[in-house]
Image: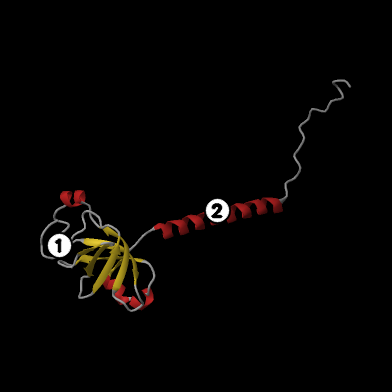
Amino acid sequence: MTETNLDLSPVAPPPSKRSSRRRSIGVLVVIAAAIVALLSQGLLHSLNYFDTVDQVFASRAKIGTTTIRLEGLVKPHTIVRTPSGASFWLTGSGTHEVYVKSKGTPPQLFQANIPVVVEGHFTTKQSTTFDGTQILVKHTSTYIAQHPKRVKAPNGTSR
């Protein structure tokens, strides 16, 4: 072969198929939609909301014995320490009250006249007795010290 016989002109690529391009775009769209769906469901299920005592009484039949987080104010003079934890009454903003039997040691800041969230379930579908597995105090002592006017007990005292 000689240099004169070599063809050094550029070769054109073969024509691309439109159907394979559409298929690729379709696959990418499906993958993106799946990722968005998984992320949104994961974020929605990881949020832990709570129901107030008044909300629970408004939808008591619907809640039944499912596990929820119940928020209310610890009623004064109702805390009884038990070998397995504590029992007390939670009040709402109205006249509703729930009797809580909690297992486990309550947090150090747990006391009367403070808002708490109790995770657990009602003992029966009509019962006002709530079996708690965890008590969460809604405000830490640091938060209360920094914002004394924001956290007040019903009797008007600051915590």
In the rendered image, residue 153, in percent from the top left (x then y), is placed at 14, 62
In the rendered image, residue 77, in percent from the top left (x then y), is placed at 15, 67
In this figure, which residue is indicated by the disc labeled 1? 153
What's the distance in space between the residues labelled 2 and 1, CA to CA? 50 Å
Q: Amino acid at mark 1?
A: Ala
- Mark 2 neighbour density, 10 Å: few (under 14) some (14–19) many (20 or more): few
Q: Quadrant of residue 101?
A: bottom left
Query: In screen coordinates, is 109 left or right of 132?
Result: left
What residue do we see at 70% from left, 51% from top? 20
Q: Nearer the viewer, residue 46 or 84?
A: 84
- Secondary structure of the residue carrying tag 1 is loop
Instruction: Name the mark on residue 64.
Output: none
In the rendered image, residue 126, in percent from the top left (x then y), is placed at 33, 79
In this figure, which residue is indicated by the disc labeled 2? 32
Q: Nearer the viewer, residue 134 or 159?
A: 134
Q: Is residue 105 above or below residue 125?
A: above
Q: Nearer the viewer, residue 80 or 157?
A: 80
Q: Nearer the viewer, residue 146 or 85?
A: 85
